[in-house]
């Protein structure tokens, strides 16, 4: 695996020249994906007993500060381009989506990405949940339903219709709670660079790489770099 920050921006021609090879690799790795799915379920059985009380506390704090709903369901693009409702704890005011256009001029990233430092829509509890990434805990249920994996390309909020041809390779696997770009700069990495990392992950995926990404994700959370 290349060191963080050394992934080049894959072009459309490069994708076309390697696409057939990538599809063959994915066929060969079908047993890997089957075992990985069972490992995801095993991981959930180990994690949920500790995670559920924490999730209950997070839900209670959100309710006490701003009422319901405590969960935010956002449509994301998953395997095969299928849309699904990805779960998070609500960290913004209830009408955050309506206010998005109002604050569009403050967007610090290239559309369709949207990020504002010190976003005024974020609640006090929401800032704590985001800083600790506890807002991501409900995605454990997405993993249980088979919509996500622990490790994989992060699902985009915009549909695959907006993807360029070379972007579509990331749709051949389940999206993940964490992935290669989360440990390689996170929010500081632009969309095309993230996509290049996703393609690199798919073409190099293995149990060892998955374990390495999960361990490095824990390190990133403790250093609190960027935001997922």
Image (tube, rainbow, N blue to C red):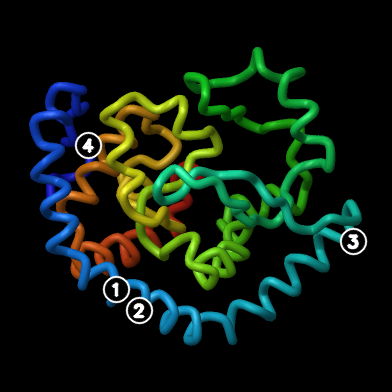
| Residue position for label 4 | 5
Nearer the observer, 204 or 5? 204
First in sequence, mark 3 or 4: give its number.
4
- Residue appearing at x 68%, y 71% in the figure: 55
Q: Which mark is residue 126?
A: none
First in sequence, mark 1 or 4: give its number.
4
Mark 4 secondary-structure assignment:
loop
**Alpha carbons under labels 3 and 4: distance apart:** 42 Å
**Alpha carbons under labels 3 and 1: distance apart:** 42 Å
| Residue position for label 2 | 39
**Alpha carbons under labels 2 and 4: distance apart:** 29 Å
Mark 1 secondary-structure assignment:
helix
Q: Position of residue 77 (x, y in %)?
A: 50, 43
Q: Which mark is residue 34?
A: 1
* Label 1: how many Cα within 10 Å (few below 14, some 14–19, many 20+): few
First in sequence, mark 2 or 4: give its number.
4
First in sequence, mark 1 or 2: give its number.
1
- Residue appearing at x 14%, y 22% in the figure: 13
**Alpha carbons under labels 1 and 2: distance apart:** 9 Å
């Amino acid at each position: 695996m290349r060191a963080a920050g050394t992934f080049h921006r894959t072009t459309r021609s490069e994708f076309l020249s390697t696409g057939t090879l990538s599809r063959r690799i994915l066929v060969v790795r079908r047993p890997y994906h089957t075992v990985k799915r069972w490992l995801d379920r095993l991981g959930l059985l180990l994690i949920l007993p500790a995670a559920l009380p924490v999730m209950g506390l997070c839900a209670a704090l959100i309710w006490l500060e701003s009422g319901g709903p405590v969960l935010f369901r956002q449509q994301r693009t998953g395997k095969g381009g299928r849309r699904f409702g990805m779960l998070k704890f609500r960290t913004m005011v209830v009408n955050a989506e309506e206010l998005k256009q109002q604050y569009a001029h403050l967007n610090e990233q290239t559309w369709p990405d949207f990020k504002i430092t010190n976003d005024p829509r974020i609640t006090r509890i929401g800032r704590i949940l985001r800083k600790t990434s506890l807002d991501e805990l409900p995605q454990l249920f997405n993993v249980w339903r088979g919509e996500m994996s622990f490790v994989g390309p992060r699902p985009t909020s915009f549909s695959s219709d907006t993807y360029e041809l070379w972007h579509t390779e990331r749709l051949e696997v389940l999206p993940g709670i964490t992935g290669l770009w989360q440990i390689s700069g996170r929010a500081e990495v632009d969309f095309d660079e993230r996509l290049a990392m996703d393609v690199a992950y798919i073409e190099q995926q293995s149990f060892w790489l998955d374990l390495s990404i999960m361990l490095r994700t824990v390190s990133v959370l403790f250093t609190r770099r960027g935001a997922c």
